[in-house]
Amino acid sequence: MDEEILQLLRDHSSEFLSGEQISRHLRVSRTAVWKRIQRLRALGYEIEASTRSGYRLLGSPDLLTPSEIKPYLKTTWIGKTIHHFDTLDSTNAKAYQLALDGAEEGEVVIAESQEKGKGRLGRQWVSPPFLNLYLSVILRPKIPPHQASLITLMAAVATADAIRGFSGLAPLIKWPNDILLQDRKVAGLLNEIHSEIDRIHFVILGVGVNLNAGENTLPKEIRGIATSLKIETGQTISRKAFLPLLLQELERWYSIFIHRGSAVILDAWRGRAHLQGRRVRIVSFGETLTGTAIDVDSDGALILETADGERKRVVAGDVEYKNEMSNVKVQSSN
Ligand code: BTN
């Protein structure tokens, strides 16, 4: 019912709506209307109340509810259905369950906070309420499972472009899917796949973007290696303005991937990662490898050349850049 009252107030934003009108429309008592108005105010809605004239909506909080986002959303299919939660263990876990239950491609799960936000390689993704973005998109690509990591590269390109489009800053992608600003991680992606040997049932594309985390709200252990758009721009970021742009970029790049194939995605990824020729140290499945990054292959694996000239194909791991960019150790965690 909160949504119904909000819609009524939005539809009459230039005038007052009396408690009587609202209660008639919603078929509830005026006391019930008043209680709902109080709840909306507690959520951050500025609602003017006058005993003579009724209620008028003056301002809305930066929430990621469907009704706050929809006015900004220009996508065709991603985000047409948005499942919004105040808190979840993990948006990926929720989206996975919804997909198992038959949710459609493009449905999005958003939480204002996560209690067990999942990062890569079993890490935790710190997810405090109302500051950042935590979302998962359900995709059902008709591609072979070995190409699933290209979806991650595609999403890294889309996230980097959304950040650039929104802020004018130029993020760098660190293999496979960390998004960095000034060598510190501003966003990360975690894709989970449900498939058979030769067929993908669905991919859950999980994206976490640090938007308004401040130096003090970032946990101590990651302060040196994580950042946020607010830290980098010095400005509070409107989450409900950023999210539609991110969904738009995801839709655009996913469509490029499906219609034009992986080569375009790999080229776009290379152009934002500047990986070739970097001296790297990679920890992969407990093994530490050093050498020069040659490229990513057609499935998104990193090709590393070791000091003795041997080429190795690395499919997962943590990369640390040895020189060129900086001496700051950049790890995969937010
Ligand atoms: C990484 O370690 O770089 C990946 C982080 C991915 C975090 C996002 S937040 C939304 C989605 N739900 C999760 O539990 N994780 C991803």
Image: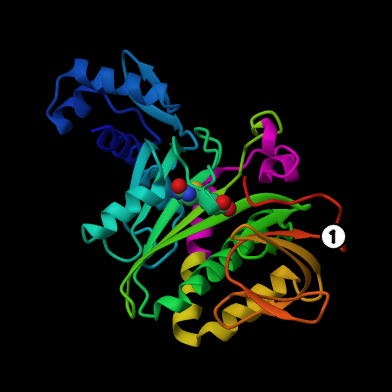
Instruction: Left or right? Give the position of 118 relative to 158.
Output: left
Main secondary-structure element of the magenta-colored stretch? helix
Which quadrant would the C terminus be assigned to in this image? top right
Could you tell me how many numbered marks the image carries?
1
- Considering every residue shown, the one lying at the far left of the view is 27
The answer to whether residue 274 is left or right of residue 260 is right
> Is residue 309 visible from the viewing direction of this image?
yes
Q: Is residue 31 magenta?
A: no
| Magenta-colored span | 220-249
- The structure residue drawn at horizontal position 50% and vertical position 37%, both measured from the top left corner, is 62
| Camera-side residue of 258 and 92 | 92
Q: Is the residue 3 above or below the residue 312 in the image?
A: above
User: Which x, y percent locates residue 84?
Assistant: 35, 43
What is the x, y in percent for residue 166? Answer: 64, 55
Left or right for 125, reference 143:
right
The residue identified by callout 1 is 325
